[in-house]
Amino acid sequence: MYKASDFAAGESVGLEIQPSQKPLPMKKVLFLALAAASFSLASCESKKEEATEQAAENVEASGEAKADAMEEKADEVRDSTANAADQMEEGADTTATK
């Protein structure tokens, strides 16, 4: 049995680990399966993001449509109020001139 004191500092033992000559086909299969799974998950994420973005755009469009409808209603109320004020003023002018 060798002891640490049998070797000088920095001296190599002379044992080298040789890589196997044949690559394992299982490693390739696992690597390809992992790559395929990664791509499928990445594509699913994109579809989820697209659906979320579309939903946000729909909400925005709906909000804009409601805001436009409210503005139109406000314009109608303002115009009808202005018309009523004009009629009241004309009525007051007519009574004042008589």
Image (cartoon, grey):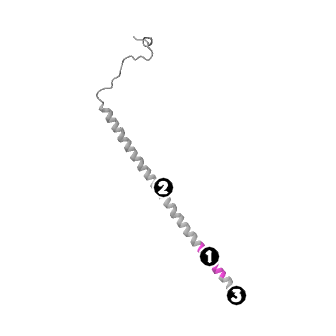
Going by the numbered disc 2, the residue's amino acid type is Ala
Residue drawn where x is 37% and y is 44% of the image: 40
Q: Residues within 10 Å of mark 2 (few under 14, many from 20)?
A: few
Q: Quadrant of the image for the N terminus?
A: top left
Q: Nearer the viewer, residue 19 or 45?
A: 19
Whole-angstrom CA distance, mark 1 to mark 2, is 39 Å
Determine whether the residue tagged by mark 2 lies in a helix, strand or loop: helix
Residue drawn where x is 34% and y is 36% of the image: 31
Q: On the image, numbered disc 1 is attached to which residue? A: 82
Q: On the image, numbered disc 3 is attached to which residue? A: 97
Q: Is residue 87 magenta?
A: yes
Label 2 or label 3, whichever comes before in sequence order: 2
Determine whether the residue tagged by mark 3 lies in a helix, strand or loop: helix
Q: Quadrant of the image for the C terminus?
A: bottom right
Q: Are marks 1 and 3 in contact (CB under 8 Å)?
A: no
The numbered mark at residue 56 is 2
Going by the numbered disc 3, the residue's amino acid type is Thr
Residue 81 lies, in percent from the top left, at 62, 74
Whole-angstrom CA distance, mark 2 to mark 3, is 61 Å
Determine whether the residue tagged by mark 1 lies in a helix, strand or loop: helix
Going by the numbered disc 1, the residue's amino acid type is Ala
Residue 95 lies, in percent from the top left, at 69, 85
| Magenta-tinted stretch | 78-89
Residue drawn where x is 46% and y is 54% of the image: 53
Residue 77 lies, in percent from the top left, at 59, 72
Label 1 or label 3, whichever comes before in sequence order: 1
Whole-angstrom CA distance, mark 1 to mark 3, is 22 Å
Residue furthest to the left: 22
